[in-house]
């Protein structure tokens, strides 16, 4: 994502994410929203939510019906976006939240 031609954020769908190294049983989930990032001076302006919406739209176009994510910093952002709690996991002294979102596939 850019603002006036300057990169300010990123996000994407990935088939593998770092938590799978720590918790292999989560390999049952195949599509992950990950690397959602907004540069510090642009945070709090809704860009994170907008990035998620755009990634979800693109995932639908690709026929993906469900996305998963994990976070230990932004649970409230994802809840506001309609993500549902799957489970809480303690990993390396962090309270990780695993979430999912059903997507209506575009035809």
Image (cartoon, rainbow, N blue to C red):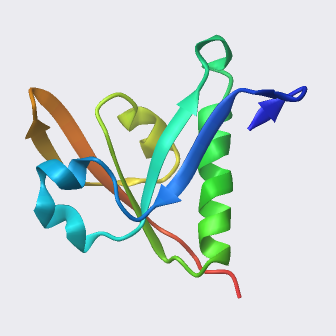
Q: Residue furthest bottom?
A: 107
The residue sitting at the top extreme is 41
On screen, 2 above or below 54?
A: above
Residue 57 in the image: state x and y as whole percent.
Answer: 67, 64
Q: In the image, residue 49 lies at what x, y percent?
A: 60, 40
Figure quadrant of residue 55: bottom right
Image quarter (top left, top right, bottom left or bottom right) of the C terminus = bottom right
> Considering depth in this image, is 91 or 20 the residue closer to the camera?
20
Residue drawn at (17%, 33%) of the image: 95
Q: Residue at x 32, y 53 (%)?
A: 99
Residue 8 position within the rendered picture, expressed as x and y whole percent measured from the top left = 70, 27
Left or right of 53, for residue 97: left
Residue 61 sits in quarter: bottom right
Q: Position of residue 71 (x, y in %)?
A: 32, 39
Q: Nearer the viewer, residue 84 or 37?
A: 37
Q: Is residue 43 left or right of residue 69?
A: right
Q: Is residue 80 visible?
A: yes
In the image, what residue occupies the spot 35% across and 28% down?
73
Question: Looking at the image, can residue 87 be seen?
Answer: no
The quadrant of the image that shows the N terminus is top right
Task: From the viewer's side, name the closer residue of 93 and 15.
Answer: 15
């Amino acid at each position: 994502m850019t603002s006036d031609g300057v990169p300010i954020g990123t996000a994407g769908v990935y088939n593998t994410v770092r938590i799978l190294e720590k918790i292999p049983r989560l390999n049952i989930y195949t599509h992950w929203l990950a690397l959602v990032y907004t540069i510090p001076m642009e945070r709090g302006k809704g860009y994170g939510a907008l990035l998620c919406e755009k990634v979800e739209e693109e995932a639908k176009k690709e026929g993906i019906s469900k996305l998963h994510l994990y976070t230990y910093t932004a649970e409230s952002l994802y809840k506001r976006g309609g993500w549902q709690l799957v489970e809480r996991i303690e990993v390396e002294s962090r309270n990780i939240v695993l979430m999912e979102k059903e997507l209506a596939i575009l035809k």
